[in-house]
Image (tube, helix red, strand yellow):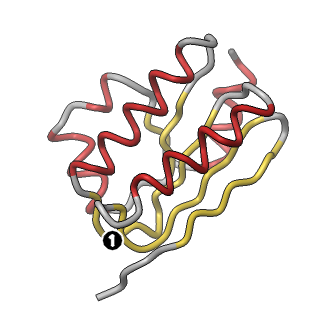
Amino acid sequence: MMSTDQILVEQKDGVLVVSLAGRLDITNSEDFENAVLKSLEKKKTPVIVRFQDVSYMSSSGVRALLSIYHALRKHGKDLIIAELSPAVKKIITVTELDRVFPVVESLENALQKVQAG
């Protein structure tokens, strides 16, 4: 079982891109949330979260996503979810979070969506 987990936060074309790997659960969801929110303190930008290498996401991961989403909405910025693994896609669909924020197939599509406004 793969556990902890990589949280890579980088700026790309004026967007905060967060790439996750491993599991997103109670052991690291707060780290994920804090890493994103800390980066947003410096500059308020849209956020793209990439889930392609995430094998599992618990309810604490969902809570972290919603917290980030609400922080972004206060500043009129978007949260876009990209490159879902099958496990994460199932959770996003069941919880109907795909109705809350955009879900796209690739990082390129997400960047285009941000630039389109």
Taking the image as shown, residue 42 lies to the left or right of residue 86, namely right
Q: Quadrant of the C terminus?
A: top right
Q: Is residue 70 found left or right of 96 in the rendered image?
A: right
Q: Please, which residue is most extreme toward the bottom here?
A: 1
Q: Callout 1, which amino acid?
A: Ser
Residue occupying image coordinates x 57% and y 23%? 78
User: Mark 1: which secondary structure?
Assistant: strand
Which residue sits furthest left? 94
| 103 vs 9, nearest the viewer | 9
Crowd tier of the residue under label 1, counting other residues whose Cα lies within 10 Å: few below 14, some 14–19, many 20 or above: some
Quadrant location of residue 101?
A: top left
Q: Position of residue 99 (x, y in %)?
A: 30, 23
Task: Determine which residue is flagged by label 1.
Answer: 55
Q: Who is closer to the viewer here, 104 or 35? A: 35
Is 74 displayed left or right of 16 in the figure? Answer: left
Residue 97, quarter of picture: top left
x and y, in percent, of residue 6 in the image: 55, 71
Total numbered circles: 1
Residue in the picture at 33% in, 71% down: 55
Q: In which quadrant of the rendered view does residue 85 lie?
A: bottom left
Quadrant where the N terminus sits is bottom left
Measured as percent of width and height from the top left, residue 54 is found at 40, 67
* Residue at position x 75%, y 36% in the image: 15
Q: Is residue 85 shown left or right of residue 81?
A: left
Residue drawn at (42%, 52%) of the image: 30
Using the image, determine if residue 15 lies above or below residue 55: above
